[in-house]
Structure formats: structure tokens, C-alpha cells
Amino acid sequence: MQKVLRTENLSASPRRPKKYNSPFWINFMYLPALILFCIFILYPFIKGISISFTNWDGYSQTSSWVGLDNYIRIFKDPNIGIVIKNTLVYGVGSTILQNIIGLGYALLLNQSIKTREFIRTIVYLPVIISPLIMGYIWYFILQFNGGALNDIVLLFTDKPINFLANPNLNVWIITCVNTFQYLGTAMIIYLAGLQSISKEYYEAADLDGANSIHRFWHITLPMLAPSITINVVLNIIGGLKLFDVIIALTNGGPGYASQSLSTMMYQMYFARQDAGYAASLGNLMFIIVSMFGIMSLIFLRRREIAR
């Protein structure tokens, strides 16, 4: 009888899940991603470093070792100063403009207005357009002969304005075009951050008699710190390696007036067949982008607050 009761109790008790150790072959499931990473990212990166120590022209089967000559050449290049300055303007300038205007749009479109969905769509729409196409659209607007903007200028003056050939204007025009295109991304990220802020904070601030400026400065901005971090890091990386819009609008000209490191690297490789020097410029750009990206990430992460 006791044996029967024991067997009944055992059958009635819930079964415990068996503990399975992950089989060894499961560790190979990440191999396809690892292989793709090595082929398309790690190998080109290592190959680019090795090419920068040679005088390869980019096409021949032979090359010779030149050591640090390409890197020394960078510091002796009389045009590298203006190119690095332009690169920093594209990166830092686009980041500042995109975040200020994007935050402004997000604050506006977070309100209860009837056309906010339509405005969000219009602001975000340029993001889905190819940067090269966006550059050509603005080229036909800003070009000297037959440009849409100059057609308007000629209604009031006798001479058109050469916007794209003016060294004092073209860098900032390119920065504004890049800002216009990716403004929607910053807006969407800020909108997500605004909608995740609890209304209790604002209700408590209202009870304390805080005005709209105080609420923005002491509640909205600190609570948007993670969104600010994401936007700043993405914008500064994208701006520092800006390429397509420059090629479409000015092709880096006149001279080196609007060149960035990415366009200079492109022209050195394909136009001048100087792959070794182009690779050294690419490595310099990698250092600058990494330095600014990591520094901004560390600086902004320290200012984030736990919610």
C-alpha cells in the first residue's frame, strides 16, 4: 500500500525541467556574423593600414615599402590644414544645428496640434533620400547659371551670386544641406525621449510655481540626456565622414576650399592614383572620428541621470 501511495505521489508531482548544458556546436552559430565582420570590416581595415606604408597606385600588382613617408607627407601637405578644418566644421557644425533645430521641432510636435503627424512626415522625409541625390537637388537650386535661387536673385539684382564657388559660403552651405537632410532623425529620437518623460514631474513643477523655462531647463533637458547622447554621437560621426553631398555640390572645390578628408582621400585614390597616401588619409580620418566619437560619448554619458 505504501509503495502504491509513493508511486501515486510521484506521478502527481510536477515534473522538474531538465537542465541541459548548451551543446558545443551552439557556439558556432555566431560564426557567419563573425566571418562577415572579418571579411568586410576587419580585413579592409588591416589592409588599409598596410597600404598606407607603401607607394601603391591602386591598380598595379606591385608596390614598394615606404615606411612612414605617407604620414610625414600629411604634415607637410599645405592643404591639409584647410581640409581638417572643413572636416571639423562639417562634423561639429552639423551636430550643433541638427540637435538645436531637431529639439525645437520635437518640442513643437510633442504638443497637441492637428497637423503634427503631417509635419513629422515632412521633416523626416529627406532622411530616406540618398545623400547624393539630395546634393544634386540642392545643386540645381544653388548653381550659378540657371539655379532656382539665382532666378529669384535676378529679379532684384543684375548679377547672380556664385554660392558654390565662394569659399566663405560653400562649406556652410554643405553643412546646412547635411543638417536639412538628417534633421528628421534627431527630431524622432528627441520625440521618443520627450514622450517617455513622466507627466508627474511637470505637475510637481507646476505646483511649485515653475514657468516654462524652468521646466525645460530643470526637467526636460536633464531627462533628455540619453537622447542627446545618441544624437550627438550619431551626428558627429556622420558629419566628420561627410562625402556624398560635397561631391554633388562642389566636388571639393574650388581647389581645396570645401574638401573634407573623405573627399580628399577619394580624389587621391581615383584621380591621382596615389593609394598609399589615400590610405594614410583614411587612417587619419579614422583616428579623428574615433577620438571625437569616444570623447563625446564619455562626456555625455557622465551627465545622464537614472530615471
Image (spheres, helix red, strand yellow):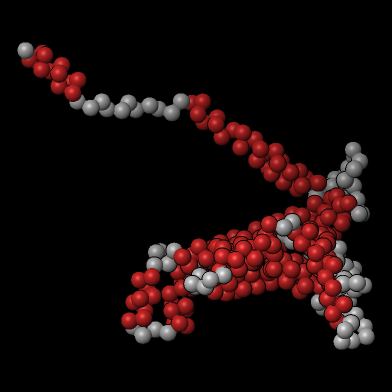
**Residue lying at the far front of the rendered structure:** 114
> In the rendered image, is residue 178 in sight?
yes
Q: Residue 251 in the image: x percent, y percent? A: 86, 63
Q: Residue 223 in the image: x percent, y percent? A: 45, 69
Residue 75: which quarter of the image?
bottom right
> In the rendered image, is residue 293 in sight?
no
Q: Is residue 199 left or right of residue 238?
A: left
Q: Residue drawn at (43%, 74%), measured in percent from left and top?
A: 219
Q: Residue drawn at (56%, 69%), measured in percent from left and top?
A: 116
Which one is nearer the viewer's eye here, 37 or 215? 215
In the depicted structure, whether residue 17 falls above or below residue 141: above
Q: Is residue 285 left or right of residue 60?
A: left
Q: Residue 195 in the image: x percent, y percent? A: 46, 65
Q: Is residue 12 left or right of residue 32?
A: left
Which one is nearer the viewer's eye here, 176 or 40? 176
Q: Residue drawn at (43%, 79%), measured in percent from left and top?
A: 215
Q: Residue 305 in the image: x percent, y percent? A: 43, 66
Which one is nearer the viewer's eye here, 139 or 70? 139
Q: Residue drawn at (18%, 23%), measured in percent from left and top?
A: 12
- In the picture, the quarter occupied by the N terminus is top left
In the depicted structure, whether residue 254 falls above or below residue 265: below
